[in-house]
Each structure stands twice: as C-alpha cells, then as structure tokens.
Image (spheres, rainbow, N blue to C red):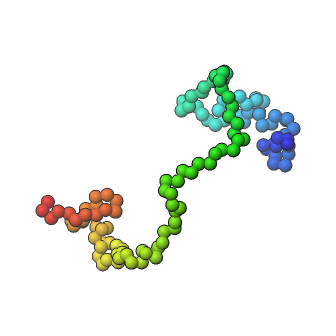
Amino acid sequence: MEKQCIFHINKNCDGCNECDVCDLDQNKICDSCGDCLEITNNDYKKVIVDDIYESKDFEEEDFSKKAELRDYRIFNEDYKYLDTSDDEDLNVEFIEDIEGLSELLEDTENTVLEEISPGLFVLKDPKK
C-alpha cells in the first residue's frame, strides 16, 4: 500500500517533497527548528540520541502468544444490580421541601448554622 499525500486526500505520495518545505522560507527544507511554531522560550530541552544500547540478554517479547486469563475478582459472587424498590421505604426530605430551610442556608450572615465542609451544616453553639 502506497503512502498517501498529506496535502491531497485522493493522491498517493509521488516524492515531490512538498511536505518537507519550510513554512517560513519556501527555498529551505525543514530542519525542525520550531521557528514556525514560535518556540523561542526555553520551556523544553532538546536531547540528542546518538545510539541506543541494548543489553546482550535483551530478548524481544513475542506478543502474538495468547495470554493466560486470570480471575481478579475480589468477591466470589457475581455482582448484581441494585434493587431500587427497597428505597421506596426510606423517609427522605429535601431542602426545598422544608419551609424556610433553603433561605436559612443561603443567608450569608447566618447565626444558627455553620458549614463545616461543603454540604455539611451543623448548629452553632449559642454560648459562643
């Protein structure tokens, strides 16, 4: 399969090297200087790699082998969906359902309630 041209979708690469031309100077071949990206600050470091050394006992792994499947389940029983029909018995009261509570919580100069952490309110000590 031939390499596809990066500028023309329906064209295969014909070796024109148009993709290697510098964006700033059309007469220059790109040398990855980064000037076109306006990278002039020192936020990055360049590392030149001359060669890669591998140890003599290095062996490439064969990833085409089938891996052994292991059972990593924490519990022996299978997970079951939660039954929400049991929740109908719970007595839940929302802030909006209690008359005057939402106004009390929104009051910034509240002398009755103190917010310890987000959503957790406690009654203030009247002695203090």
**In the drawing, does residue 17 fall left or right of residue 87?**
right
Hey, which quadrant is residue 58 in on the image? top right
**In the drawing, does residue 42 fall left or right of residue 113?**
right
Residue furthest out toward the left: 127
- Answer above or below: position of 121 versus 85: above
Q: What residue do we see at 85% from left, 45% from top? A: 11
Position of the C terminus by quadrant: bottom left
- Decide which of 43, 12 is in the foreground and name it: 12
Residue 96 in view, yes or no: no
Position of the N terminus by quadrant: top right
Hey, which quadrant is residue 20 in on the image? top right
The mark total stands at 0
- Decide which of 39, 92 is in the foreground and name it: 92
**In the drawing, does residue 22 fall left or right of residue 68?**
right
- Answer above or below: position of 119 versus 103: above
Residue 12 position in % (x across, y down):
85, 43
Residue 88 in view, yes or no: yes
Q: What residue do we see at 35% from left, 76% from top? A: 91
- Answer above or below: position of 83 versus 24: below
- Answer above or below: position of 39 versus 103: above
Residue 88 position in % (x across, y down):
42, 78
Hey, which quadrant is residue 127 in on the image? bottom left
Residue 118 position in % (x across, y down):
34, 59
Q: What residue do we see at 28% from left, 58% from top? A: 116
Q: What residue do we see at 87% from left, 38% from top? A: 14
Residue furthest out toward the right: 14
- Decide which of 112, 58 is in the foreground and name it: 58
**In the drawing, does residue 83 fall left or right of residue 89?**
right
